[in-house]
Image (spheres, coloured by chain):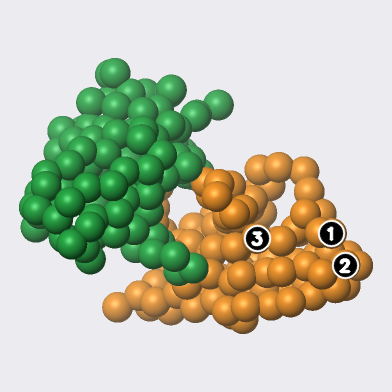
Chain colours: A green, B orange
Amino acid sequence: KQEVTQIPAALSVPEGENLVLNCSFTDSAIYNLQWFRQDPGKGLTSLLLIQSSQREQTSGRLNASLDKSSGRSTLYIAASQPGDSATYLCAVSSNNDMRFGAGTRLTVKP
Amino acid sequence: SQTIHQWPATLVQPVGSPLSLECTVEGTSNPNLYWYRQAAGRGLQLLFYSVGIGQISSEVPQNLSASRPQDRQFILSSKKLLLSDSGFYLCAWRSQGDQPQHFGDGTRLSIL
């Protein structure tokens, strides 16, 4: 059964710093990996989707990488801003279901 | 464009009462539909998913059930709520297994 782990559980950085969030998964037989953002009390907003055949995806200040063989993905956020403060979740898709990590709670201080 | 609607946004129910949460998707046909629960401080737990009308797969044994009476409608139900059913319930859809998943705004359920 697929297990997804995110490290760190929480992260606090000053505004302007570049940062990396980590996600690992146990079963490399995946369709894709998706990064989400969740604001308190809200639903999930999709940030990036990486197909199993891809190595990375970029959107603005966000870059996500995927190393399927080692079961790892990273989300890189450049020049962080206070508006980036949220919980970031990674999710691995296999067959018809999707398994989520517990998330990394990011705080960007002005 | 596609949209997903969940209601109600918040719900307070007594223990032992029934539950019905509804989720509908617009702008697509034959989506895969999902129900998740997010307990306080924890990750998302997949409860049910459906690949078509009347087809429901359950991930964990529990006090809840799901139904898909129409192509773009997914309902989460319970006959008698337990305290442990409290949480944040999220509905999601995607067109195929390799496509991104999109979420509704969620229902916060509190059991008293």
Q: The disc numbered 2 marks a residue on which chain? A: B
Residue B3 sits in quarter: bottom left
**Residue drawn where x is 44% and y is 65% of the image:** A40
Residue A60 sits in quarter: bottom left
Q: Earlier in the sequence, mark 3 or mark 1?
A: 1
Check contact, mark 3 vs mark 1: CB within 8 A: no
What crowding class fits label 3: few (fewer than 14 Cα within 10 Å), some (14-19), or many (20 or more)? some
Check contact, mark 1 vs mark 2: CB within 8 A: yes
Residue A25 sits in quarter: top left
Residue of label 1: B82
Q: Position of residue B78 (x, y in %)?
A: 81, 65
Is B15 placed left or right of B12 in the picture? right
Residue of label 3: B87
Distance of label 2 from label 3 (alpha carbons) = 14 Å
Q: Position of residue A65 (x, y in %)?
A: 18, 36
- Residues marked 2 and 3, same chain: yes
Q: The disc numbered 1 marks a residue on which chain? A: B
Distance of label 3 from label 1 (alpha carbons) = 11 Å
Distance of label 1 from label 2 (alpha carbons) = 5 Å
**Residue drawn where x is 17% and y is 51% of the image:** A14
What crowding class fits label 1: few (fewer than 14 Cα within 10 Å), some (14-19), or many (20 or more)? some
**Residue drawn where x is 30% and y is 54% of the image:** A107
**Residue drawn where x is 36% and y is 28% of the image:** A24
Q: Quadrant of the N terminus of chain B?
A: bottom left
The answer to which of B22 and A17 lies nearer the viewer is A17
Is B57 placed left or right of B4 in the picture? right
Is A44 placed left or right of A63 in the picture? right
Q: Earlier in the sequence, mark 1 or mark 2?
A: 2
Query: What type is the residue that disc 2 sits on?
Result: Val
Residue of label 2: B15
When the figure is inspected, residue B101 is found, relative to residue A99, above or below; the finding is below
